[in-house]
């Protein structure tokens, strides 16, 4: 984990953003904050994010709509989403949250220790993903260099005959 990784927290109530920020203070990452669905989507277009903590009920665009739009974008379709809510505890809302791609659904008041563990887990997972992507990139570059060298070697062999 590092301060180069981002967690996006989205809630239309400033006091909830402050509370989430306090809970995640000991987690080694940058916290990006949005107070609306539109602001969240704008931040997601500009920043790589390891995790989104997303309020369900917000004016305008609710959390479910944000998640649906995230899942339609190649840039954000694999970003883990944890819904955080105080109101939508009914099974139909929880099912809808999972249906739009959430990996978890947490109810307020939050247990700070559990949220910190979940955040650290997804930051670790994001770091592993980035390392694998880098290894894959280097492997592909090596393969291309090898194939190019083999092609050049084959050309020089045929010229020498």
Image: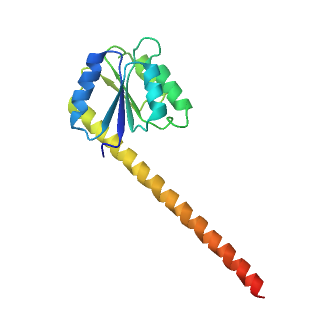
> At x 68% / y 73%, what residue is drawn?
151
Q: Is residue 44 above or below residue 120?
A: above
Q: Position of residue 108 (x, y in %)?
A: 27, 20
Q: Position of residue 124 (x, y in %)?
A: 34, 46
Q: Quadrant of residue 122?
A: top left
| Displayed quadrant of residue 93 | top left
Q: Residue at x 47, y 26 (%)?
A: 41
The number of numbered discs placed on residues in the rendered structure image is: 0
Which residue is pictured at 59% across the width and 68% down the height? 145
Q: Residue furthest bottom?
A: 161
Residue 158 place in picture, x, y as percent: 76, 82
Q: What colour scheme governs how the chains and residues are painted in the rendered image of this protein?
A: rainbow
Residue 92 location (% of width, % of height): 44, 17
Residue 159 versus residue 119: which sits nearer the camera? 159
Image-based side of 41 in relation to 112, left or right: right
Q: Is the C terminus in the top left, top right, bottom left or bottom right quadrant?
A: bottom right
Taking the spot 51% from the left edge, 57% from the top edge, the residue there is 137
Residue extending furthest toward the top = 59
């Amino acid at each position: 984990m590092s301060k180069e990784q981002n967690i996006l927290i989205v809630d239309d109530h400033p006091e909830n953003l402050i509370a989430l920020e306090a809970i995640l203070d000991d987690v080694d990452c940058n916290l990006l904050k949005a107070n609306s669905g539109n602001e969240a989507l704008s931040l997601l277009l500009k920043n790589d994010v390891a995790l989104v903590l997303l309020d369900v009920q917000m004016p305008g665009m609710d959390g479910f709509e944000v998640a649906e739009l995230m899942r339609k974008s190649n840039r954000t379709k694999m970003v883990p989403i944890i819904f955080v809510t105080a109101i939508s505890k009914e099974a139909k809302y929880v099912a809808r949250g999972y249906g739009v791609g959430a990996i978890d659904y947490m109810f307020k008041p939050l247990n700070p220790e559990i949220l910190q563990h979940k955040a650290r887990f997804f930051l670790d997972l994001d770091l592993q993903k980035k390392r694998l992507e880098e290894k894959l990139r280097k492997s592909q570059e090596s393969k291309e260099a090898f194939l190019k060298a083999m092609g050049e070697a084959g050309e020089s062999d045929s010229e020498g005959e």
